[in-house]
Amino acid sequence: MLVAATPSLRSKVGAYVSLTKPQIIELLLVTTVPVQIVAARGIPSLWLIVTTVVGGTLAAGGAHAINMYVDRDIDALMARTRNRPLVTGVIEPRNALVFAIVLEVAAFALLWSTVNLLSAVLAVAACLFYVFVYTLWLKRTSTQNIVIGGAAGAVPVLIGWSSVTNSLDWAPVILFGVIFFWTPPHFWALAIKYKDDYAAADVPMMPVVADIRSTVRQMIAYTVVTWALTLLFAPVAGMGALYVVAATVLGAIFTYQAYRLLRDASYARAMRLFGWSITYVSLLFGAMALDQLVRSGF
């Protein structure tokens, strides 16, 4: 009788890291530090940046681990996710859940003790929203799952702002809207390629329940709203010309890329839009930080 090999310590650690979906966390944190710079009108203390980033990473990682715990049944049905550690059995479900809870507790404790209570509450609230509203409720029941559920991914901008000011204002709320409306075209571009996977798992992502052209028309609408909000952010937050030019050009390219998908509804074009959507956020928030650093004379 064949006996399954025991995973090495290295592979076990790697499996726990993969539970946190580090590639998604990286994208979330790209938005946090630039917002801290805007809120501080310069570079805040290195200690504040580090503790906020670490706390945010722990909170997002815990939320993603719970998501994998809940979705392990449908992950087994999709080619894109069938090698996740809870599907392969490298990690036991109970251990994954305990790991996730420990991350959330650690995130709250770290942010409360080193940043402020508001940031800690926002981080844990984002986790609860992601788990209970998106994962447990909307993902398997509604075509608007990623639209509404995407609000959890927009919370890091609020955390970045509150970590510096210990308050919220219209500027971070508008940035919340930027990420909220950016999420559907970003995620649906990926879902277009993997729509057969979602169909096999009976997950009603928009590209599964609607034809691609109808989905892309909605994506274009979301990119236009995103573009408009990035421009609205300029006067509300007192941004300079560098940011305004960047937001104008980047938004135009984002909208054009979505329009090209309407003309060429291929998987390759969808993945180009997906890749650009990540570049878009990175460049937009990078320009935001650079604008403030230049104006503050850094």
Image (cartoon, rainbow, N blue to C red):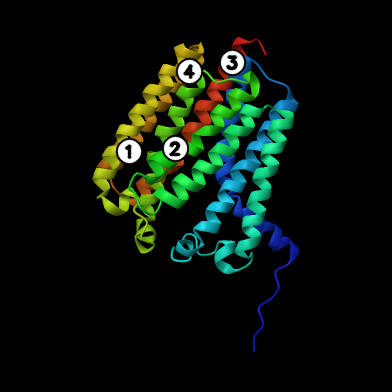
Query: CA–CA distance between discs 1 and 2?
Result: 12 Å
- Tell me where residue 34 appears, x and y as whole percent: 59, 25
Give yes or no for contact between labels 1 and 3 (Cβ–Cβ under 8 Å): no
Q: Which residue is mark 3?
A: 292
Q: Which residue is mark 4?
A: 170
Q: Which residue is mark 1?
A: 219
Nearest the camera: 164 or 133? 133
Query: CA–CA distance between discs 2 and 3?
Result: 23 Å
Q: Amino acid at mark 3?
A: Gln
Q: Looking at the image, is mark 4 or mark 3 earlier in the sequence?
A: 4
What crowding class fits label 4: few (fewer than 14 Cα within 10 Å), some (14-19), or many (20 or more)?
A: few
Query: The N terminus appears in which quarter of the rendering?
Result: bottom right
- Tell me where residue 79 appears, x and y as whole percent: 45, 63
In the image, which is nearer the foreground, mark 4 or mark 3?
A: 4
Q: Which residue is mark 2?
A: 277
Query: CA–CA distance between discs 4 and 3?
Result: 18 Å
What crowding class fits label 2: few (fewer than 14 Cα within 10 Å), some (14-19), or many (20 or more)?
A: many
Query: CA–CA distance between discs 4 and 2?
Result: 24 Å
Residue 131's place in the image compared with 251, above or below, is below
Q: Amino acid at mark 2?
A: Ser
